[in-house]
Each structure stands twice: as C-alpha cells, then as structure tokens.
Amino acid sequence: MSYTRRQFLESASAAGFITPLSIKNRDAEPSDKEQAKSPEVVKRVQSINDPLGVRGDFPVVEEHLYLNSPYITPSPQQVIAAGNAFWQAKSHNPILLGDMLTETTRVRQQFAQLIGAIETEVSILDATSAGENLVAGSLDLRSGDNVVVDDLHYETTYALYRNLAETRGIELRIVRSDNGAATPEEFEELVDDATRLVSVAWVSHQNGYAHDLRALADLAHGHGAYLYTDAIQGIGMLPLDVRKTGVDFLTAGTYKWLLGGYGVAPFFVRSELLDTIEPDRSGSLNIAQELPDFHFELHDDARKYLYATPAFGAIYQLGAALDYLDNVGIANIERHTVALARRLYDGLMAQGHRLLTPPGNGSAIVLFEHNHDPETVRQSLGKAAVQATLREEGVKIRVGAALFNNEDEIDKFLEITDGWR
C-alpha cells in the first residue's frame, strides 16, 4: 500500500500507536507548519521535576532510577509507536518500497538539518563502525602513513587500525589522555605531514570527555589530513554544526542519545570529499540510472553508500525520534543534562570519590571510582533499582543524565553513593 508520511502518522494515531510529542518550551502554540509536519503535537506541562516536559513519554522513569543512557537510551513512546505502526502495516498492508525510500530521504534530510549539513552529504549505514571502516578503506592507506587516535576511543577503532598496521604497514599513533582529557595540544605532538586521518569519539564512551572538534579539524587540515568522528555519544545530547567544527566524516548509531533503534547509523561525508570516499559494495540502491546492456550510472552523492535494503522499521523510528528531539530542542537537552551531570560531579567530589571525568566537561556523562566493596555497591544499586554501567569489576561507575532525568534522581543517587564512604 502507498502511504504518505501524514497518512502513516494518522493511521497509526487512529490505531492507538501514536501519542503526543513534546515540544519546545514557549508561550506560543505550535505553528501551522509544525502542525502539518506532526499533526499529533501538543504542548506538555513542564515543572520543576520535569523541566523539559518529557517524563510522561518515558515509562522507564516509573520502573528504574535510570542513569545508563550512555549504554542504551530508552526511547520515548512516540518512537515505539512509530515502530509498532510500521510492523502493523507490514502485517496488514505492507508499505511500498517507494514510500519507504521516500521516508528514508526525509530522515536523511532531518539528520542533515540536525548537524548543519545538506541531504546530499548524508547516507544511512547499519552501524557506527561501518562509517569509519568505509572511510579508512577509501583513503588508500599504506606504509609510511599514520593515523592518530587517542585512548578514549571505542574498541572498534583500535581493531580497525591495528589490522591496517598489519596488512598495509601503516602506523597507529595513540594519544594518551591526561586526567581524563585528550587535548588538541596533546594531539599536536603526534600529528605530522604523514598523518592521513585523525579519528576521535566526539564524546568518549569511557568517561564522557567532549573533544574540541574545531581545534582538531584545524590541526588535521593543517597537515593535509582529515578528521573523522564517532558521534554516537554526542548527537542528541549536544548541538553540532559540521560546518563550524570542520568535521570531514561522521557516523552515529541511533540507539543512544538519538532515541532510536538498532540497525541504522547516519553517515556524513563533506561534499568536497564525496569523490574521495567510494562505496565498498554495490547494489540496486547505488543505481541512479539504468543504461543499455546492463550498465548503470551510480549516484554521485551520499546515496551511493546505501546499496541495499536498509532496516526500514528502524528508519521510521529514527524519523519519529528526530521529530521528538527537534520539538524538545537539542539546546534545551544540553542545558538540562549537562547541568545534571555537573550536579552529580560536584556531589561525588564532595563525598570524596575519585572523578575520572575532567572538571568542567561539556557532556552529560560522568565516570567515577569508588573506594568500597564492589559487591556491596552492586547490591545497593540493585536494591534502589539504579541502572548504571559498572566497569573494571565494579570499581568504576559510569553515569549518564538523559533528558528525562531530574535533580531528584541525581540527589537520590548521591544519597546512595554517600553511604559508600
């Protein structure tokens, strides 16, 4: 069956799969344009305990003290509803391929707008690591070249470049962080004219350290290199403008701060570099035009990386998630969540815990080390229904404040940690 996006939303709403979206804090009612884009939008009531007016959309707040969003961020009901509606359509009257591809284009446009790019620079891959593999495979890296990363990156990056060191003879240079930070000055010591690529996790999954992308881009470009960033721990939490930061390539899975599902990862390539990064496989969706005798003209923009049928259900969910984030406002999310993280940081510091996230850091993630029996810590967290990530056999704890968290939850967590002294 052929569906417009509006028909999809309306049919889902009629079936009970769509509930109201949150919107930005403002006095005016939603504009006609906003209503046309998302007819289910209504204004939420904000309060001291719910500054963004979103907690009602996240059932997890009724079940856990959930501070584990750096691991997996719970999706709001609107995103779950979009997924349910997609699969109900699959069961009763499947959406046509053309309509699903139209939705894919709309989601690419949404993501491009979110990061300050244009649609032709954004594709959809299946995982964050797929983007860096695609970039590294296109740069014709060889003996004499080096790639510079830091020790705050995700494991995939080390596996990728260690393999290239063994198979192509490149050199992997690793900046060692100091007190939880890897500054541009520290990168400068390892970047030279043989550097082909500087790669960082914009926000580190390890301790939440937020890199200075503009400074790193200037450093890389000054030596004729490129800047790649794994943005999965930043996009959806913090604003990003790829033009202002100078990022060349970026990938972000959607199951964390983007509030989406699994199996899709938007991939950005700066327009001037689209000819440099070639697709690593071929399929029907690479094709822009069919020519005689089984010859083809391929897309010359970011669509060339989307070679075969993607996870359409997750794409519909991502569309709903991007709508949701747009209505709440990334700047509002940043202001709220970073403030919660700093409240947590200050509280843990006052209690004497060792903080492994740099002071004044600009993300919503905090890593700390307690000086207590790990098993006792696990039990106390479990008893209080706290969800967080325990590292190094429970000695370190990573906590993340999401848009649905509030000061009361941070204070409750601090009451627990205060008992570990």
Image: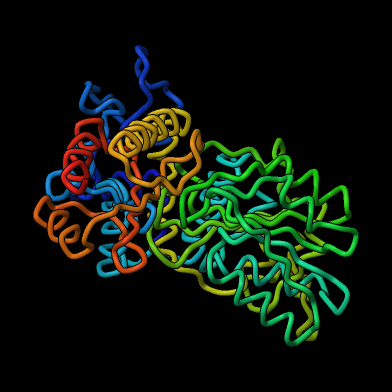
Q: Give the quadrant of the N terminus.
A: bottom left
The answer to whether 418 appears left or right of 171 in the picture is left
Work out whether residue 214 or residue 100 is closer to the camera in this orientation and state it.
214
The image shows residue 338 at horizontal and vertical percentages of 42, 34
| Front in this rendered view, residue 326 or 347 | 347
Rendered residue at 82%/74% (across/down): 141
Q: Position of residue 331 (x, y in %)?
A: 47, 29
373 over 357 or under it: above or below? below
Q: Residue at x 71, y 50 (%)?
A: 186
Residue 41 locus on image (x, y percent): 31, 32
Q: Position of residue 300 (x, y in %)?
A: 77, 62
Q: Which colour scheme appears in the figure?
A: rainbow
Does residue 144 sit above or below 14 in this rendering? below
Quick check: 119 left or right of 342?
right
Front one among 176 and 85: 176
- Determine whether 313 is above or below 25 in the image: below
